[in-house]
Image (cartoon, rainbow, N blue to C red):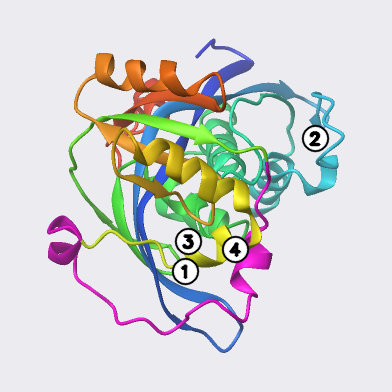
Amino acid sequence: MEGGDQLRLPAPAKLNLMLRIVGRREDGYHLLQTVFQFIDRCDWITLRRRPDGVVRRVTPWPEVPEDQDLTVRAARALQQAAGVREGVEIAIEKHLPLGGGLGGGSSDAATTLLGLNHLWGLGLDQAVLAGLGLRLGADVPVFVAGHSAWAEGVGERLTALDLPEPWYVVITPNCRVSTAAIFSSPDLTRHNPPIKIIDFLAGQQENHCLAVVKALYPEVGAALAALSSFAPARLTGTGACVFAAFEDEAEACAAAARLESSWRVFVARGLNRSPLHGLLGLCPT
């Protein structure tokens, strides 16, 4: 937080602790069951008020054109929905990889929505912001809600969960997974039986995208094998990142130290509440 005409806010990553595909809607969207938990690895978004109504990204980022950037789209969607005449300059410090399954773009969008709601003094309910966010991406609502959650539908129907908050070792393989390619694969099983929260808590934590991801991106399979030598490793989302949980920071750091000569790896703490909400004084929903 800074104050006045400018805010600097975190956009935390998420892990999918489980991901099931339990159907498909007529419009092609997949019906999911998943569990989201935040980690303390973040992008950082700086929002600077403009009086002229212009929404502009000031960070050069050739990989993502400005008009396709979810922060810019989020700001313009909020501006239109609330009839705002002010604009904003958006600066992005990227620490979360593209195509990594950590939710970086969706988290950036949610931080933009919540931050501008504060900066522009709109006072909109978080449910309204989540609705706007859903139009940008299925993962945006959980970042707006700010609490670890069981999710259904396309990922927008949320039930808050209080989970253990372990230390995670996360490997980022040298590839960028296309979510569209995974969900359009003919090899993806789309009608798995649904489970209940109690089943997840009892250990049903598979990711139904894993087989397709490993087939299309061998680097992910290699990362899973490397990390599994220290603790059971899982895929987050549609990948590419893989993660394993450890009870304490020292154990996680020791594993990461042994992996870092061959892999891009980092250690992060699991969080049930988003650090963004703490800075803005919001109650997670």
Q: Earlier in the sequence, mark 1 or mark 3?
A: 1
Is 52 situated left or right of 173 in this image?
Answer: right
Question: The residue under label 2 is which amino acid type?
Answer: Gly
Is 175 situated left or right of 152 in this image?
Answer: right
Seen in the picture, residue 165 relative to 155 is either above or below; the reply is above
Mark 2 or 1: in front is: 1
Q: State the separation of the CA atoms marked 3 and 2.
A: 44 Å
List the residue tagged with mark 1: 154
List the residue tagged with mark 2: 53
Residue 215 numbered tag: 4
Identity of the residue drawn at 47% across and 81% down: 190
Kindly state the secondary structure of the residue where label 1 is placed: loop
Magenta span has 180?
yes
Identity of the residue drawn at 57% across and 60% down: 213
For the residue pair 268 and 40, the one nearer the viewer reads as: 268
Seen in the picture, residue 49 relative to 225 is either above or below; the reply is above
Question: The residue under label 4 is which amino acid type?
Answer: Ala
